[in-house]
Every structure is written in structure tokens, then in C-alpha cells.
Image: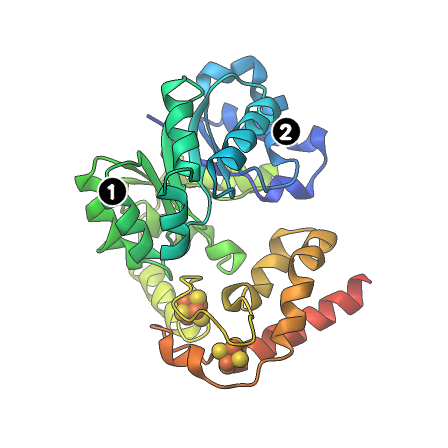
């Protein structure tokens, strides 16, 4: 059992240890009990470890590993336990299981799942989860019956999971964690985002926060839900139709690209620049954006995109945004 709304651990990478600990404790005092982080989120785990050591049994801590084999996942889990200053994690998730190859890899003998299963029987974790941006792969994973939780993007412009994945997760009695309730920073009206999400109480959203006022606003929306008025519904429809033709859902159906461009990453510059510090944004994107510069506009990716996004044009737009950003921060 967790609070109706949780906490996503990416944005605290951007603030110092003292501010992060104070924010996390503030969120805990506001009643938030689910805190989600990942091994790859810089020092996010350490900040949560420092914040919650003294109230460990009153929070639910979830982390993730990107390792795909058992040995790597076991060592990442030990590192997460150390960072989070705990002997047992509540939820440990296989991070970003984006395609069939990855799902097969993690579930194969010697794959990461094996390490998580052993950790569960050894008492190092309570529940095994996975996160993905690909609804179909998440459904396949859920149907194996071997996961306790599933984490997927869910907001009013990314709601494919509602009719496809969520019924399967409910049938398998799994917990559902909704990542990116504000579409990774693309949506900025919290009243609309949480008004929409509050219609689906089986999903626990985990908004990333980096300041007390953000936490207060979200907690306020849960303390006194405002519902979706006709005006808000109208605004949601307007934003949906405006973003529907250019918002990448990171499902990877368009991959692979013959120029080896990681397309969803190349299309996500707006979210990167909003959520991560400049050094991390550049370190994570530079190689891929150099590849994006080699796009030959073959159009194969656009043919595979179920949302009919004009991918080559969007790559150019994101490339130009990235170049401006690098110029500004170099
Ligand atoms: S471009 Fe389309 S197919 Fe590719 S990841 Fe984005 S939404 Fe999915
Ligand atoms: S259009 Fe560009 S991004 Fe798309 S598959 Fe071709 S080279 Fe890759």
C-alpha cells in the first residue's frame, strides 16, 4: 500500500544533497510514501538514502537496474542497497525493457531476472518490477506472471496503456506505477495532468519534483481533487491535438535506424534540457546527436511509427535545439 501519488527521483539530481534531503523529507511529511529512483540517476539513490534512513519502515523505496545479466544486476542491487542505506528494497525493477531482444535477454538463464528472483528469496527485495516505454513488450512481460509491478508512461497524451496494458496488469494482480505524469516536462498544467490521472486510481503516478512549491501544488491537488471541468477537458483536447503529431512516446516501434540513430532519444531533447543539468544532457546525448546529423531521410522509421510522426523533420528540429543548447552552455 502506498500513497495515491509517489515521487520520481530524476530531478533531485539537479539540486544539492542538503536541499534534496529537505525536499524528500517535506514530501514524506506531506504524506507521500512511494519514492522511485534508479541506479542510473546519478546521486538520486544516495539522496534518498540520506533522507529516509531514520524512517525507513515508513516509506516504500523502489529502484531499478539497467544491467541485463544476472551478475551485473546482482552487483547493481548491492550498490542500490548501500546507496539507499537499507538491507532490503521494497521494489527492484528491470529498467527500460524496451524491446523483445531485451526482454528475452533479461528472462533467459543467466539473465538479470534470475538475480532478482534470487534476491527476493534471500530477502533483499520484496517485489520484482519492470519499467518500459513499450506497451506491447510490457504486456508480454506481465503475462509471464513473474513480475509484481509494471512502470509505464501514463499521462493525458500517452494513454495507450489504459486499454491494453492496465487490464492485463489488473488480471495479474500487479501494481502499476505511472511514470512521466507531466510527459517528462512537456506538459506544464499540473491541474490538468493530475485531474486526468485521478480518474485512474489503480495507477500511482510518480512526478519528478525538485522544489517544495511543486510538491505543495501536487499534494494540494490530491488533498482537494478539482476534477475535470468542461473547461479543463477542452484544454486537454487542445493540447492533445497540438502535441499529438509531434510528441514521441518512446515506444521504439520505429527502430532500428540504418544510421544507428536512437530515434526516441533524438526526439526527446526538450525533456532532457528541462530535467537534467547541462553536463548530463550533453554527456548523454552528444554521440546520438552526432549520429542524428547523419540522417539520410530514408523515411523507413516514419512508416513504422504508429503515431505517424514526421520523424526526419523532428530530428532536424531537435538537432537544432541541441546545437543551440550546446552553444549556450559550452
Ligand atoms: S518516433 Fe514514433 S515509433 Fe518512434 S519511438 Fe517515437 S512514438 Fe514510437
Ligand atoms: S529517416 Fe533518418 S532516422 Fe529515420 S530510419 Fe532513415 S536515417 Fe534513420
> Camera-side residue: 228 or 290?
290
Residue shown at 52%/15% (left/top)? 55
Q: CA distance from mark 2 to mark 1?
A: 33 Å
Residue shown at 38%/23% (left/top)? 120
Secondary structure type for disc 1: loop
Mark identifier at residue 46: 2
Residue 305 x %, y %:
38, 74
Residue 212 x %, y %:
59, 36
Respond yes or no on whether mark 2 lies under 8 Å from ligand 1: no
Is 113 positioned to the left or the right of 199 in the image?
Answer: right
Image quadrant in which the C terminus is located: bottom right
Q: Nearer the viewer, mark 2 or mark 1?
A: 1
Residue 150, image quadrant: top left
Q: Can residue 155 be seen from the camera position used here? A: yes
Relative to 241, does residue 88 appear above or below in the rendering? above
Q: Where is mark 1, residue-wise? A: 144
Relative to 128, does residue 190 appear above or below in the rendering? below
Residue, far front = 109
Q: Residues within 10 Å of mark 1 (few under 14, many from 20)?
A: few
> Camera-side residue: 229 or 168?
168
Secondary structure type for disc 2: helix
Residue 124 x %, y %:
45, 20
Q: Residues within 10 Å of mark 2 (few under 14, many from 20)?
A: many
- Work out whether mark 2 precedes mark 1 in sequence or the reverse, and give the earlier one: 2
Mark identifier at residue 93: none
Is 271 positioned to the left or the right of 219 in the image?
Answer: right
Residue shown at 63%/29% (left/top)? 47
Relative to 296, does residue 276 appear above or below in the rendering? above
Q: Can residue 133 be seen from the camera position used here? A: no
Q: Contact (CB < 8 A) between labels 2 and 1?
A: no
> Camera-side residue: 220 or 282?
282
Residue shown at 68%/44% (left/top)? 14
Amino acid at each position: 500500500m502506498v500513497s495515491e501519488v509517489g515521487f520520481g527521483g530524476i530531478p533531485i539530481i539537479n539540486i544539492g544533497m542538503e536541499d534534496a534531503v529537505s525536499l524528500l523529507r517535506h514530501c514524506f511529511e506531506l504524506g507521500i510514501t512511494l519514492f522511485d529512483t534508479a541506479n542510473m540517476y546519478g546521486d538520486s539513490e544516495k539522496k534518498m538514502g540520506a533522507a529516509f534512513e531514520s524512517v525507513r519502515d515508513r516509506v516504500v523505496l523502489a529502484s531499478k537496474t539497467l544491467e541485463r545479466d544476472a551478475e551485473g544486476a546482482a552487483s547493481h542491487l548491492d550498490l542500490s542497497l548501500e546507496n539507499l542505506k537499507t538491507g532490503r528494497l521494497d521494489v527492484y525493477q528491470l529498467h527500460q525493457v524496451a524491446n523483445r531482444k531485451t526482454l528475452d535477454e533479461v528472462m533467459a538463464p543467466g539473465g538479470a531476472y534470475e538475480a532478482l528472483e534470487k534476491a527476493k528469496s534471500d530477502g533483499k527485495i520484496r517485489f520484482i518490477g519492470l519499467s518500459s516505454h513499450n506497451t506491447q513488450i510490457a504486456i508480454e512481460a506481465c503475462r509471464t506472471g513473474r513480475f509484481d509491478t509494471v512502470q509505464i508512461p501514463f499521462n493525458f497524451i500517452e494513454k495507450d496503456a489504459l486499454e491494453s496494458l492496465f487490464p492485463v496488469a489488473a488480471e495479474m494482480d500487479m501494481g502499476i506505477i505511472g511514470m512521466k505524469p507531466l510527459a517528462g516536462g512537456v506538459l506544464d498544467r499540473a491541474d490538468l495532468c493530475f485531474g486526468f490521472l485521478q480518474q485512474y486510481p489503480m495507477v500511482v503516478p510518480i512526478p519528478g519534483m525538485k522544489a517544495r512549491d511543486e510538491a505543495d501544488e501536487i499534494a494540494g491537488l490530491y488533498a482537494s481533487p478539482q476534477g475535470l471541468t468542461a473547461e479543463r477537458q477542452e484544454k486537454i483536447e487542445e493540447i492533445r491535438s497540438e502535441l499529438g503529431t509531434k510528441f514521441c512516446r518512446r515506444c521504439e516501434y520505429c527502430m532500428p535506424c540504418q544510421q544507428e540513430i536512437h530515434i526516441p532519444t533524438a526526439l526527446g531533447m526538450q525533456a532532457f534540457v528541462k530535467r537534467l543539468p547541462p553536463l548530463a544532457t550533453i554527456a548523454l546525448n552528444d554521440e546520438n546527436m552526432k549520429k542524428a546529423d547523419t540522417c539520410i531521410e530514408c523515411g523507413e522509421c516514419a512508416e513504422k511509427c504508429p503515431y505517424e510522426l514526421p520523424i526526419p523533420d523532428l530530428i532536424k528540429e531537435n538537432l537544432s535545439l541541441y546545437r543551440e543548447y550546446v552553444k549556450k552552455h559550452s
